[in-house]
Amino acid sequence: MKTHRVSLFVSFIIVLTLSSFIKKDEGLRTDKFVVVLDAGHGGHDPGNLGNGYKEKDIALKIVLEVGKQLEKNPDIKVVYTRKKDVFVDLFVRGQIANKANADLFVSVHCNSHHSQAHGTETFVLGTHRNETNFEVAKKENSVIFLESDYEKNYAGFDPNSPESVMSILLSQEEYLDQSIMLASLIQNKFTNSLKRKNRGVKQAGFIVLHQTVMPSVLVETGFLSYKKEGAYLNSKNGQQQISRSIVNAILEYKKSLDKNVNDFSATNDDVPKPLEPNTEQIIFKLQIAASSKELETEPYNFNGLQNISRLKENNLYKYFYGNVGSYEETKTLEKEVREKGYTSSFVVAFKDGKKIALIDALKTTAN
């Protein structure tokens, strides 16, 4: 029965994604860079209430400030999923972004925990690398239970099921590079400009992200449950600082797209090395970087890492580390690349030398 529900939900996502692309194509075209800002929770859903603060109110104030600053740029159009204290279904938030033909979707939230945890973290859609990521996603996804007809709208999706959450990877996989790029920029601004504790860029199965067909991130701006941080986020000064960091990250992201430049300084090599084929089984690698530049896959270009492979997709070169036969082994690879500074790496799968959807690879009996 569980397998049937997961299969049904996967089918639902495929249909939803295709229909979303159709809506996106039929939407009004604009020369402007469209950013959809999503203030988490709202209305009868207050979000978390750490130290008596209301997540829904703080998220909205931050989003409105971000929008106010972005709207000063004549090349940017801002669309809001909500501008006041109202409840908006998660799937409707995605529809708003898709209809707007958005270039970015940014969802803003505040965190909570029973411990003294604090700091900022930004999520992109992906597999749960640990139980903590799953718990964060489960908490945010549980909002669907406050919606009417949630079983119909989400085709039996269960926020408490890792299998169900895994299935929502399909619709965002092709935008993962750009999503991670934006998430990394946001975290860098929080850390370098505001000196906030950096909890990193993470992957988890947020249903609000899977509803969109564009690069999308979910920003946890801090922990209301941590007294000092909660007071900071509830203050006007704190909200303005957080907003400014998000704005600067979005502007930097847009600038990098406009110039088609990524964060690489090494020189190009005249002799490209193709991705080695493997026809025996599904293999897993970690994507550690993407660039418009074609780099030699040598250790000096990748902080000393060896066993680097490269693949060109469209106008982007993607660089991968490792080559293992099971998903479980990627945890070791992840530790190795993080030690070299690649904190935003993520798992990709190959079959017969060609990249395939990660969720398809994880369905095989061998993995």
Image (cartoon, helix red, strand yellow):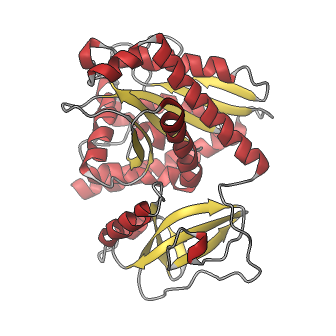
User: Where in the figure is residue 334, as x and y percent of width and height?
Assistant: 38, 64
Q: As drawn, is 138 to the left or to the right of 34?
A: left
User: Where in the figure is residue 159, as x and y percent of width and height?
Assistant: 28, 41
Residue sitting at x 48%, y 11%? 236
Residue sitting at x 39%, y 14%? 234
Is residue 9 visible from the viewing direction of this image? yes
Give the quarter of the figure containing the N terminus. bottom left
Q: How many marks?
A: 0
Give the quarter of the figure containing the C terminus. bottom left
Q: Nearer the viewer, residue 271 or 193?
A: 193
Q: As drawn, is 49 to the left or to the right of 178?
A: left
Q: Quadrant of residue 7?
A: bottom left
Residue sitting at x 57%, y 56%? 174
Q: As drawn, is 86 to the left or to the right of 193?
A: left
Whether residue 218 is situated above or below residue 128 in the rendered picture: above
User: Where in the figure is residue 151, as x and y percent of width and height?
Assistant: 32, 35
Q: As drawn, is 345 to the left or to the right of 128?
A: right
Residue sitting at x 18%, y 30%? 114
User: Where in the figure is residue 332, as x and y percent of width and height?
Assistant: 33, 69
Q: Quadrant of residue 284?
A: bottom left
Whether residue 278 is situated above or below residue 304 in the rendered picture: below
Residue extending furthest bottom?
A: 280
Is residue 212 visible from the viewing direction of this image? no
Q: Nearer the viewer, residue 31 or 242?
A: 242
Whether residue 218 is situated above or below residue 130 in the rendered picture: above
Whether residue 317 is situated above or below residue 31 in the rendered picture: below
Q: Nearer the viewer, residue 205 or 144?
A: 205
